Image (cartoon, rainbow, N blue to C red):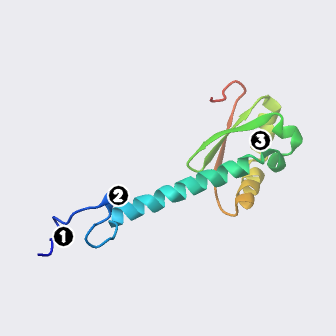
Amino acid sequence: MKPSRRTSPRGPKGVNSVSGMKRIDEVIRSVSLSQELGMGLKRQEVLDRWESVVGTGLSKLSVPDGFEGFELRVAATHPAAMMELRMRREEILQRLNAMAGETIFREIRILAPGRRRG
């Protein structure tokens, strides 16, 4: 007797033990998680090279403070650094995305001195 679709036994992690196939929602969830992790790692690798993106002087007065979605938060330790970051915002975004080989950030939010998260 062949089990019906509705009552077919499931194996580990959403695998149908009769057909050996994964459910489509499990596959999609797995691929989505993998892409998110890959994007996060790529972003972190690029941010680890912050000095080469903004230069030695500005890197001493600013630090990437995190990201959410396509927004990068940058903490500035001096008002002059905030001004320079604002003026160079588009250039910095272009450099970060070029280093990654794809769009990893679309916005930069500059945090005032003393506003750093963490």
**Residue 2 in view, yes or no:** yes
Name the residue beneath numbered marker 1.
5
Name the residue beneath numbered marker 2.
13
Name the residue beneath numbered marker 3.
85
Q: Is 22 left or right of 102, judged from the image as shown?
A: left
Give the residue type that dot 3 points to. Leu
Give the residue type that dot 1 points to. Arg
Q: Which mark is residue 32?
A: none
Q: Residue at x 77, y 41 (%)?
A: 85
Number of the front mark, 1 or 2: 2
Give the Cα separation between the discs numbered 2 and 3: 47 Å
Give the residue type that dot 2 points to. Lys
Residue 12: percent from the left, percent from the top?
33, 58
Please identify the quadrant where the N terminus is shown.
bottom left
Give the Cα separation between the discs numbered 1 and 2: 17 Å
Q: Residue at x 55, y 49 (%)?
A: 69
